Amino acid sequence: MSDTAQVKTVCRSCWAGCGVIVDVEQGRRVTGVRPDPDHPRSRGYMCPKGAALPWTVNRPDRLNHPMINGQQAGWQQALDDLGAKFAALIAEHGPHSVGICVGSGCDSLGMQAAGRLRLGLGTEQFYTPMTVDIAPAVKAAELVTGYGIEMFPKWVPEDEQVRLLVICGSNPMVSHGYVGTGGFTDGPRTFAAFRARGGTIWTLDPVRTRTADLSDHHLALLPGTDTLVLAWLVRQALDALAPDSSVHTVTRPHDLAALRGALAGFELDAVAQAAGVPASELQALWQDIAKAGRIAFPTGSGITFGPHALVTELLRWALLVLTDSLEKPGGMWFDPGWFDMFETREEWSPAPEDGHDYPRPGSRPEMKRIGGDIPESLMADEIEHGPLRGLLLVGASPLTAVPDPDRLKRALGTLEVFAVGDIIPTPLTEMANHVFPLTNQLERVDLWTVNEVIGPAYPQLLRPVVEAPFERRSSVHLFAQMAKRLGAQQMVTGGLDPDGLSDEDVLENWMGRARHSIEQLRAAIPYGIAYDRKVPWALEKAVPDGKWRIAPEVLLRRLSELLASFSGTAPGYPLLLTSGRQIRRVNTMENARRPRDGEAPNLRITAVDAQRLGIAPGQAVSLRSANGALEARAAFDERLRPGVVSLPHGWHEANTGHLTSAMRIDPETGQPQMTAIPVAVEPVAAAIS
């Protein structure tokens, strides 16, 4: 009899959630992973992140035991000590003296538990990736619809009436989807099927990405000029709007008039020149939009990282509304939700027209919160000048996500209490007073239902594939145990003692309004339960007066400012830096034994620009902006357009946070600019071997 079992599960290394079959030796060791041909979404597809799962679960540097001040401890001791210290801070300084930070390395159930613990403690000090990643998209949704993350329109590939897909600043063939594209698995086959039924794909990106290769048209616009292109497209849509169009019934006349006035100066030739593309290509794009009628236009980090991200997001909404592309066949849809069935919810509380104005961060009152979260870029300010004295950080890497990482590292070092939960050692676990070893994705229970934000509409209950050895525990366990020690059990576990609960029990306690029962989820293992996303509910149920608010004051004001002051490069910084995803990594999460060719944090540059600057392939270069500098290795890449360089984000070794400043982030969203940054590049050393 073989000691190896084959277990079907889902790879959770990114948002695609591809089905995989895991070879497990004696229930304890992962020896192989291959794609599952029967999985209803991925259908036998798996990227290199899935292939690397044996390495990620078996890697020899895993954290195995809790630590207190560098000394090994048991979970009970470490939890009691951390709980007592947090309780003392709260007693002396109030609940806002302690905070929680979760990152993309935290699992879906852990995210839920963290949010519930935050509410149970009553602290405003809550930090998530949303504020360094998709904050402009959340804010734009709130301004247009009255709501934030619930209202992210998605391209639904099963809507076979879609005829035009516009992708701007996104590379789903590598990232496998994010905001608006959902869990995008097996991109080549998905694109091929879309085009076979008559669909056309436009990709707008300074780089000829893998996605651009599979598109019908690639518009290689200059970084940061997507805002101008969208402004022109919205102007065209307004001019083309027929008097009897149904768009008039879902918009307000004064919004249409105000937006038309704000866009009057965005002329075709000026926009084409600024974007560095022929005017004829912009006209061709608009003609395809007009021909298709409705469009799918998901957002991406190339938009949300940009210098005018909020304006770009609001213009994307306006284009979707003016082409009648929301909640209609051939357009985009709002997920009806799983934990909360939005289409049946009776009471909705929309934000006012200028958005929610939550209590401002004490250290930076000019900044706004996003969805109630404090922008992660303000964490150093909240430590240095605000109330934050103790922090529990789980699966997060703010040092590679926010501006001024050196300043943040110094600030974290001054915390009275700093606890980190993670899977492997990191620069943050080395700094922490308390370290908790967490389970890998194949060692824990998960609910794969990030569908309400970015992922697939297939809620799946996932159970451990292998036993968690040593003293590794789930993030749910960590948050539930902290809730017990800090009087927040009611919010996290319904008042039940977590000592007697499994993670599956905790999940069941949260499912009061869920679309399916825990019994249905169990019965649907391993493939989950599909439900229809093509359900119109947002406009009828939730949007105030059934009217999309497409001309918020901030958009009108910033359009005027943009037209008067737009510039690309800056004196002394003649190149524009973009950032990009890598197929073997998601942010800082390592999914390979070592970086392969093209996967290291290399600065990609064209041979033309490199020759002009005296840079050889593989040479160390200095990359400078007005805010700071870093060093990287040059790699020639002719898929860039001249004048553009590219560096992946999420690396400690070449940290793009050094090039930005926390003092120059958008006060409406807290989002740092991470693309279209004016930079200078020069050689600093001989070629690196």
Image (spheres, helix red, strand yellow):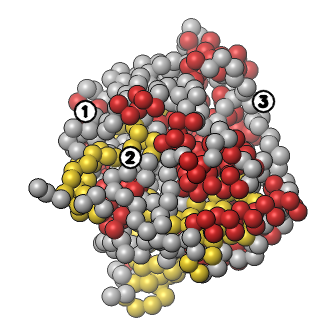
Identified by mark 2, the residue type is: Arg
Q: Residue 193, labelled with which disc? A: 1
Residue sticking out furthest to the bottom: 686
**Are circles 1 and 2 on residues that touch, CB within 8 Å?**
no
Identity of the residue drawn at 78% across and 60% down: 87
Amino acid of disc 1: Ala
Which residue type carries mark 3? Pro
- Residue drawn at (82%, 64%), measured in percent from left and top? 88
Q: Is residue 434 visible?
A: yes
Name which residue lies at 60% across and 81% down. Answer: 70
Figure check: 263 above or below 616: above
The crowd level at tag 1 (other Cα within 10 Å; few <14, some 14-19, many 20+) is some
Q: Quick check: can you spot residue 293?
A: no
Q: Earlier in the sequence, mark 1 or mark 2?
A: 1
Would residue 633 be found to the left or right of residue 662 on screen? left
Q: Secondary structure at mark 2?
A: loop
| Residue on which the image places disc 3 | 352
Q: Which mark is residue 463?
A: 2
Name the secondary structure under disc 3. Answer: loop
Q: Residue furthest left?
A: 1
Q: Residue at x 43, y 68 (%)?
A: 470
Q: Nearer the viewer, mark 1 or mark 2?
A: 2
Question: Label 1 near label 3: C-beta < 8 Å?
Answer: no
Q: Residue 473: percent from the left, percent from the top?
A: 50, 60
127 vs 412: above or below: above
Q: Secondary structure at mark 1?
A: helix
Q: Position of residue 271 (x, y in %)?
A: 55, 44
Q: Name the one closer to the observer, 27 or 579.
A: 27
User: Where does residue 4 sit, x and y in percent of width and height?
Assistant: 19, 57
Q: CA distance from mark 2 to mark 3?
A: 42 Å
